[in-house]
Amino acid sequence: MSKGPTPAMEQFYEMKSRYPGCVLFFQMGDFYETFGEDAELISRELDITLTSRGKDKNGERMPLAGVPIHAGEAYIARMVKKGYRVAVCDQVEDPKKAKGVVKRDVVRVITPGTVIDSSMVPSEGQAYLMAVVPDAKYSIFGLAFLDITTGEFFVTTCTADDGGNGLLSAVDRTSPRECILPQSLSPQVQPLLEGRGISLTPREAEYFDHNEACSRLARQFGVSTLEGFGCNDMDEAVSAAGACLRYATETQKCDLGHISTLYTRLPEHGMVLDAITMRNLELTKNIRDGGKEHTLLSVLDRTKTAMGGRLLRTFITSPLTDIEEIKERLDAVEYCLNEPLQREIIRGSLHRFADIERIAGRIAYGNVGPRDLLTLCDSLERLPGIRDVLSLDDSIIPSLLSEIRTDIRDHTDQVSLISAAIVDDPPVLARTGGVIREGFSSELDEIQDIRRTGKNWIASFQQQERDRTGIKSLKIGYNKVFGYYIEVTKANSSLVPPEYLRKQTLTNGERFTLPELQEMEQKIAHAQERQSALEEELYAGVVIRLKEAVSSIQATAQAIARLDLFSSLADAAAENTYTRPVIEDSGRLQITNGRHPVVEETLSSVGFVPNDAELDTESDQIVIITGANMAGKSTYMREVALISIMAQMGSFVPADRAVVGIIDRVFTRVGAFDDLASGQSTFMVEMVELANILNNVTERSLVILDEIGRGTSTLDGYSIARAVLEFLHGTGKRGPRTLFATHFHEIVEVEADLKRVKNCHFAVKETGSDVVFLRKLIPGATDRSYGIHVARLAGIPGKVIQRAGEVLETERCRAPVPEGKRAPRYTQMLIMDGPGGGYATESPALIELKNLDPDSLTPREALVKLYELKKKV
């Protein structure tokens, strides 16, 4: 008859049943052990040796894998990073006092969206837990986002009828790690979230009950109604917020007092940037590898603190539409720019400033480490100096900087407490001991004195016994198994006094003890145990006292983040020669000598060619851009969009002058992508993205369209491109500001038919068979793309290039002007440096000019000829 599981294993099975879907880290002494499938999993994922121990319920050998407790956080972090959920089951009573099996319980559940330990959370970004709740018609999604590390908590909504683009846009702005969603949520939604690498946590419908959510949130914030949070009529978003808070409380197993308020962010309160636009413009992630390098974020980020860096990401992905709010931000940046000495003092003080926002979160949670407290103390000590720099006349200092000065609270009490309680060089973990400074607790000082006295007594007793016995090599040692002992070598065994009590026999000697040594050992052991317990108690008391100041520390952290950000934007403006944009309530978008902020940085050694932009919803609403491949069309269009976003986020911009009439949304359709896994070709993806633009664009939007219709046949593509232009132009007096780049040269004729359309092109310079891209946008259209030249630069074999040129010549000669159509008007600027100037000789005006002999003309004849040539052009 097989034996049943041991009491400890019964505990394991019980905990495992209570936390399905979690890897259970089960404390046994100094190790976290895993069993069965969990052991096989962590052995595979963490490259840990897999062993076996005893038998499972089926009588099979039980797989076993474990990690030391002192290294447990690192292993747990690796599992969570891979998307697993870990339940930590600790021994919750002293094994020495336990009667029978040691009591154990799960003290926390760590999931991708609820990590709070500093080792598991990157400092540069938020760590959001997300919840999604659809309305009954699946037309709206209520969304909630909670960063448990900082206490940031907000709700918003998005439409559900746009192919998931609204949901993905919210996801791309926040980069959540985990999403709680109803089990019944449409299967079309789950793949979208999984495709963004988000860990999904389905829950039953009751988990999102609206009434329960309202009650839970009201209790958390100590209010009777949610009306003051601006979300009273957002039932789905409130349900999502309640689910977020419930999940965080269940996993953390404690009161989350640092989650003290709820913000409401509505799409109409700011510029809307969808997922496609954020990808195409590479705001925070580059397209190449998803990293920060070569993004708008990398160019603007001069922040000194992790808090400021996180706030910068929010500013970039959520620009404002309120003119006064934008101007207030610009005022703060301008003040920091114009006061370089104050800016340097502030930035010097913020250098190596701790992430006090997340430390406050760990204080509230109760797992803050002693080194965290020291870095917190060091940062709080710098605050009076920072506040003094801002202590100027309120008529001089901008309103936002005045608010920051007010929000930097007085933390003298917290600094005094930490300085008095924590030693200068504490261990990483409080339970290690040696954390509390001498003089903080008289009781602890007495215990430490007993331990010091005891060690001195041991040293004195050793010398006493050497003198008394005549054994000069006698020594007193200690180990955890036998405690203190007197060790005598075999050579001196004859000198051992009869009162020595034998304790252990060794190969080369023996170990003994004496009653007085045993008595002192008990005193020292008791003092050591008492010291450890008292240190833990004192440290917990310090943390409890600091919890009272969490909300104050959070307010200070947010003020420091804003100050860091504004001084950072000023630094970027000073270094890159940015100017303050003019923000107005109009349909204008005027940029003089604008530059692409990212490309400019990478081309700093050779210089960036600036360009102007003139768009107006009522006049030059649409600019059609034609010209050579590689001439700079895509760079230019992205440049205009980025300058607009920078202006409305409150940053200075890379231009000599910029006037930005408020833009409600920026749409982009650039580049070629496909989604073959879901059965969508490149052209299908293009059309889906285009549909999103045309269905959501408004008169205040900015639209960037690059090569619409190029993914299908020439005739179909041209037809689609022309129809899109006519749709955006509309029949009213105004329409969305639009940049439209195309290689369908026939489309430039639209300028004659649509009054708010203007043609422009990028100039090139031809030198024999060579082409130089001048990167300058000038008025007029062109019929040249120079695709064959670009192919040659890319390394296409010479025979292919030659044949392509022949085919092009044949086709150009063959293509007649359609009957009833006028020849298109081209004004491509071609600068001829030598014979054989390419296809420019096709222009009659240029042919006549080339054959003209200026020396044979009188001044009057020359003037008449000039007018004739101008008329032909």
Image (cartoon, grey):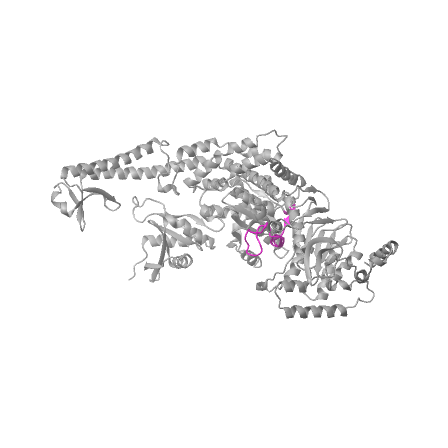
What is the x, y in percent for residue 725?
74, 57
Q: Residue furthest front?
A: 855
Say whether residue 268 is left or right of residue 463: right
What residue is drawn where x is 23% and y is 37%? 459
Instruction: Tell me if residue 685 is in the magenta stretch.
Output: no
| Quadrant where the C terminus is found in the figure | bottom right
Q: Is residue 845 visible?
A: yes
What is the x, y in percent for residue 762?
71, 55
In this view, the residue in front, 733 or 802, is 802
Count of marks, rendered view = 0
What is the x, y in percent for residue 844?
81, 63
In this view, the residue in front, 435 or 363, is 435
Residue numbers of the magenta segment = 267-295
Q: Residue furthest right?
A: 860
In this view, the residue in front, 284 or 174, is 284
Residue 276, relative to residue 565: is it above or below?
below
Say whether residue 417 is left or right of residue 277: left
Say whether residue 735 is left or right of residue 426: right
Q: Splitting the image into 4 quarters, where does residue 58 fall? A: bottom left
What is the x, y in percent for residue 740?
71, 56
What residue is drawn where x is 51% and y is 34%? 383
Q: Is residue 706 visible?
A: no
Instruction: Tell me if residue 276 is in the magenta stretch.
Output: yes
What residue is drawn where x is 45% and y is 50%? 110
Residue 551, relative to residue 824: is it above or below?
above
Residue 577, relative to residue 677: is it above or below?
above
| Quadrant where the N terminus is found in the figure | bottom left
Q: Splitting the image into 4 quarters, where does residue 440 fall? A: top left
